[in-house]
Image: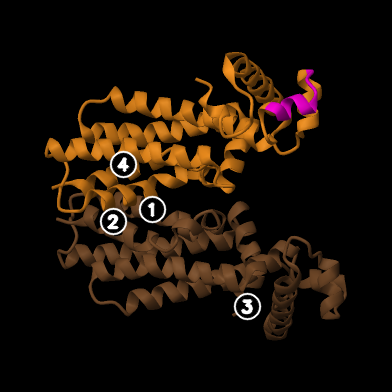
Chain colours: A brown, B orange
């Protein structure tokens, strides 16, 4: 419990945990309205009704708060992707759904929560831990599909699994990374199906 | 001759052509030093020693000058890509070289001519004609390789050519588009070979 706090502040215990949650939830609202980049910890303190010093007791910086919010956003996308993959039968269909869910879920965050999307963009630029963890969890989902497809003999097994996984991840990356996604709106409709088909052809035995 | 002028100004003839070239070459130098976005036509006029009105006789806007410079830059990248493709034997190797040349040549423009790269970025954002023409010429190179590979029976022919071409173009796009390329430096070293191998697996018979 409260493990996220251990690297960021001396605050501990279940009550501290509640205060942290309260700060994160108020900050999420504030960033949603005013944007991440433009908000200072002083602005946040004023809006929440805490002193700046009190906030710093729980978070060492604005980025530490942003990281948690970002982790929550990315976790939502990941949940969507997992649900889409789990709902499909067989590795090929799982892979198709994965491409589709990546684009749909990232686009939803972009259009509904533009201001929070800015945090995800900051995370991607700054290689925040939240963004790196997200990347590895998405790679894990992909690897599980590939393993399954190899077991069921839907996919070829000549190419080393790592090589296959890394290459497919590179194909997905422009739609996972918010910084890249914003320049891909023109091809967002057809991209998931086309790329999934190409990738499936590359996996055929 | 002087066909590029016809849509942009009433200026005509071989001497006008020389003046246009002179403006473009001076503007290229100026943009290279001071950047495209920050320079106005007045700045340019002052730097070249022409009146603003005289420049407007040949170009209807700064963008019209930018378009020509951008077209020149993109033409250089295209020449590099064509040379790389032509120097290789067989469709599979041509495709590998194409991926490699796209990344290398775009990266060279980015690192050597950062200020001119900004023009290419503006072109990509604004869907300038120069950028659209570049896209279709690159797609043509790709299509020629695919046709060749189908003729020589290196590539499968079940998938419609257009579908194959569009999907592979989507895979190349993040490395062709300057706006996307700037966020892909982390994977620039391994991306061309990995993606080319994946694409070649997708084309196997």
User: What is the C-alpha distance between the residues marked 4 and 1?
Assistant: 11 Å
Residue A8's label in the rendered image is: none
Q: Kindly tell me whether residue A120 is visible in this rendering.
A: yes
Badges 1 and 2, same chain: yes
Percent across and percent down for residue A39 are 79, 65
Please give the name of the residue rendered at 53% of the width and 31% of the height, measured from the top-left corner: B71
Residue to which mark 4 is pinned: B196
Label 1: element kind = helix
User: What is the C-alpha distance between the residues marked 3 and 4?
Assistant: 45 Å
Image marks 2 and 4: residues in contact by CB distance under 8 Å: no
Badges 4 and 1, same chain: no
Percent across and percent down for residue A191 are 39, 59
User: Range of the magenta residues?
Assistant: B49-57
Residue to which mark 2 is pinned: A199
Residue A2's label in the rendered image is: 3
Disc 4 is attached to a residue of which chain? Answer: B
Please give the name of the residue rendered at 50% of the width and 59% of the height, measured from the top-left corner: A185
Compared across the picture, whether A186 is left or right of A195 comes to right
Q: Nearer the viewer, residue B29 or B102?
A: B29
- In this view, the mark in front (3 or 4): 4
């Amino acid at each position: 419990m409260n493990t996220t706090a251990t690297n960021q502040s001396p605050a501990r215990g279940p009550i501290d945990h509640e205060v942290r949650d309260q700060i994160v939830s108020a900050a999420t609202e504030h960033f949603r309205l005013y944007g991440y980049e433009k908000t200072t910890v002083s602005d946040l303190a004023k809006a929440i009704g805490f002193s700046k010093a009190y906030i710093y007791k729980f978070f060492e910086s604005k980025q530490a708060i942003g990281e948690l919010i970002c982790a929550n956003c990315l976790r939502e996308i990941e949940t969507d992707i997992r649900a889409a993959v789990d709902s499909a039968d067989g590795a090929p269909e799982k892979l198709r759904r994965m491409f589709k869910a990546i684009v749909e879920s990232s686009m939803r965050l972009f259009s509904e929560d533009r201001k929070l999307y800015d945090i995800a963009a900051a995370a991607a630029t700054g290689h925040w831990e939240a963004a790196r963890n997200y990347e590895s969890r998405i790679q894990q989902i992909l690897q599980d599909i590939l393993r399954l497809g190899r077991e069921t003999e839907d996919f070829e097994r000549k190419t080393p699994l790592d090589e296959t996984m890394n290459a497919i991840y590179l194909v997905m990356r422009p739609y996972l990374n918010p910084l890249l996604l914003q320049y891909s709106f023109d091809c967002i409709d057809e991209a998931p199906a086309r790329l999934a088909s190409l990738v499936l052809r590359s996996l055929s035995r």
